[in-house]
Amino acid sequence: MATLYDTIKSKIIIDNLPNEFLAGELKNLKWAGFLWRPIQNKNAFVIGYQSELQNIHLKMYGSELQIENSLQKFYMGNNYQDFTFSQVLTALDKLNSNLPIDIYKTTLLRADVGVVIKHDTTQETDRWLDYKGTLPIPMIKGNVIYGKEIRKTNYKFKAYNKTFEAQKTTGVKLEEQLMRVELKGNNRYFNNRTNPIGLYTVQDLIDPIKYRLLANELLNFYASIKKKTNLNFSNWSTKETRLYGYMNYEDSAKAMKQHHKETHKKERGQFLKLLSKYQDTTKENIVKDKLKSKVAFSINN
């Protein structure tokens, strides 16, 4: 279940495209061994043409070809099995040999990286508090919350129940309890930053150094999510439990700080000691360690 790349989206300008693609007629066109069907907007105008290569979507707008979908699903038909770096190289070569363009020269618009681990999704996502002030949003399918995602303009980070999702979307029954952790980023997210990863074309995706940087990006993002600590309350005294309760409730903590400053200061210290005393570090690192080993497997195979 070590997978890294999933959906990729890229584009390229086709120089020698037949003029009929620019005429915008409502008819199917044949070009480069593909049948292209019209794409219409809500006013029924033809704005482009589309085709497929297995599950890969090909869309032509004017002379711009856009290529999008899961590289792993194209190569192995699913995105819950192991998909290693060497398989990524083979998959891109296979895609390249079936397309009328050089896939490696296409401009990268988006890349998704993710891994699948054996874990209880609810147990994990119920702990998520926020990421740099952004709250996680529940992922819902048919009234069932099956994961959580952190969503911003240039990226999305999610963890969801892959077993549930596979059953719902493809009818595949997976025996194990699988969780998929995924980071979707556009080219601005990966490149416009202090330490850019430098993903400009599909060629960059096959650079082993950039592959490692992307893997670390996934791990670092996960590590930066603020989470509830794993605590076992069974050995706590009444006083400790009460202290934990009022410190964790915003209104009472604020009131104590305002009206009983000295007591609050003293008890805040006790509260922090309490957390480090009872925190279950093994549990804390369980998901992080699973992700690390999956990422390492994907890089080295």
Image (cartoon, rainbow, N blue to C red):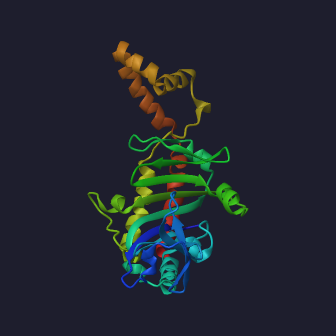
Percent position (x, y) of residue 231? Answer: 55, 37
Percent position (x, y) of residue 44? Answer: 52, 61
Q: Residue at x 54, y 40 (%)?
A: 230
Question: Is residue 63 or residue 211 the one in the foreground?
Answer: 63
From the viewer's perspective, is 274 left or right of 171? left
From the viewer's perspective, is 9 left or right of 72? left
Viewport quadrant of the N terminus: bottom right
Whether residue 83 can be seen here: no
Percent position (x, y) of residue 218? Answer: 44, 59
Q: Residue at x 43, y 32 (%)?
A: 273
Whether residue 1 can be seen here: yes
- Residue 7, above or below 139: below
Marks counted in the figure total 0
- Residue 224, above or below 104: above
- Residue 80, above or below 268: below
| Residue 180, picture quadrant | bottom right
Percent position (x, y) of residue 290? Answer: 54, 59
| Residue 78, picture quadrant | bottom right
Q: Residue at x 46, y 72 (%)?
A: 24
Question: Is residue 176 or residue 20 the one in the foreground?
Answer: 20
Q: Residue at x 35, y 22 (%)?
A: 265
Question: Is residue 194 or residue 201 the one in the foreground?
Answer: 201
Residue that protrudes farthest toward the top in the picture: 259
Residue that protrudes farthest toward the left in the picture: 194
